[in-house]
Image (cartoon, rainbow, N blue to C red):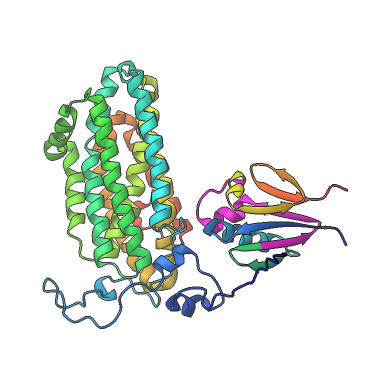
Amino acid sequence: MSRPVSITLQNSQDGIAIADAIMADNPEAERKPFPAMTKIDCPGRLVIRSDSVSLLLGREWDPQEIHMSVISLSGTVDEDDGSFTLFWRQ
Amino acid sequence: MNIDIQSEAITPRRQTFSHIARRFGVDKPASRYEEATFDVQPSANFHYRPTYGPEFELYDPRRTRIAMADWYVFRDPRQFYYATYNISRAAMQQSFDDAVGFVEKRDLIAGIAPEWRAKVEGCLLPLRHLEWAANMNCQLIADWGYGTQITSAAAFCGTDRLGLAQVISRIGLVLGDGSDEKLAAAKTLWMEAPRWQPLRRLVEDMLVVRDWFETYTAQLFVLDGLVYPLVCDAFDKAGTPHGGAPVSMMTGFLADWFADNSRWTDAVINAASGESEDNRLTLTRWIGHWGGRALEALAPIATEVLGDLGPAALAEARRKLSARIETLGLTLPKELAA
């Protein structure tokens, strides 16, 4: 099994929407609720699509806004206009 | 001494309000938008009927011909509640302020050809009276409408319309070098110029419509759906050869606002038409009636600005509205057919 990547988000309006989008787009992701935060683990690779988050928030969401909701993350980050991806280099 | 810090997870006993939990389930945290809009409408225990209309309760779904089993299907795709609405509109206001500041600082208005400047004064500035009427109509929807989802969004839209009237007034002040003379002249045009009277009459007839959903359809879907493409696309493009770009900088915001608002109006009309065949027939009849009148009322203004190209520009606006009507699953009324 590939090493898990993970991201921890605040339970804010934006954070919950990002977590919901991750769960919808990454079938293998596992969501763990903590007080005031949510940790999501996913084997290998985790993608956050700005389209999915925008749809849930009802406004244009820029992947750079993720830094206002992130508490912690582990994995290599690949970021562009449409998505924010976490993975491990082989 | 050794201090051992432990964390203890405290499970909240409730995730949200009971009325939201009854709709979405008890174990799901609701978004602010959902908490602010779903099932907030008072629906029982009204003591006195309003003296101005004793045939209805204070809040009554029978104030419109549109019938819905559930009035909470008009979800606003923008999810506006107080905070999101203000954040979004503050950004819009800022972009408009920046554009006007840029135009004023560099005195770009001086570069516009005088004949085009006169056209802008005669055709854009009177529209602030149209925006004011739209504000009145939105507030009527907020007052007589049923279901917080639609009434709160309508109240926000009404505030938008006051803001748009102010935006147009500000452009008038820029064109008048800080004096209100252009605005006063535009009001005289609105009140007296023959080419504006059909539109003014249409707007005044719309103000006295008693069915709030008809007001919604006529104002926000039909009239806006024709006026904005005409003013923001056709008039704007026609100004470019006359050095009209500084005006476009200031009015570009109107097109952004219209695109944003149309997401909401399309969702509302779509939800109402999806409910029943009766609703579809009623909506088609309203769209036909008001669409036909709006096309007639806008024709002299389109011709005034664009000359021979006026009818084609109006036809293009009609085509855009027709395309929206068809994607919403409604029959195109004969008044709007090409």
Q: Quadrant of residue B235?
A: top left
Q: Please tell me whether residue B241 is drawn above or below residue A84 in the rendered image.
A: above
Q: Position of residue A37 (x, y in %)?
A: 61, 62
Q: Residue furthest front?
A: B1
Q: How many marks overall?
A: 0
Q: Please tell me whether residue B57 is drawn above or below residue B145 in the rendered image.
A: below
Classify residue A28 as left or right of residue B177: right
Which region is colored magenta?
A39-63
Q: Please tell me whether residue B265 is drawn above or below residue B176 in the rendered image.
A: below
Q: Position of residue B175 (x, y in %)?
A: 25, 25
Q: Position of residue B330 (x, y in %)?
A: 42, 62
Residue visible at 18% across and 28% down?
B182
Q: Residue B113 in magenta?
A: no
Q: Is residue B22 visible?
A: yes
Q: Quadrant of residue B131?
A: top left
Residue visible at 82% across and 50% down?
A88
Q: Quadrant of residue B213?
A: bottom left
Q: Residue A61 in magenta?
A: yes
Closer to us: A80 or A34: A34
Q: Quadrant of the N terminus of chain B?
A: bottom right
Classify residue A15 as left or right of residue B300: right
Q: Position of residue B298 (x, y in %)?
A: 27, 42
Closer to us: B41 or B324: B41
Closer to us: B254 or A56: A56
Residue visible at 16% across and 38% down?
B190
Residue visible at 46% across and 63% down?
B32
Classify residue B325 as left or right of residue A73: left
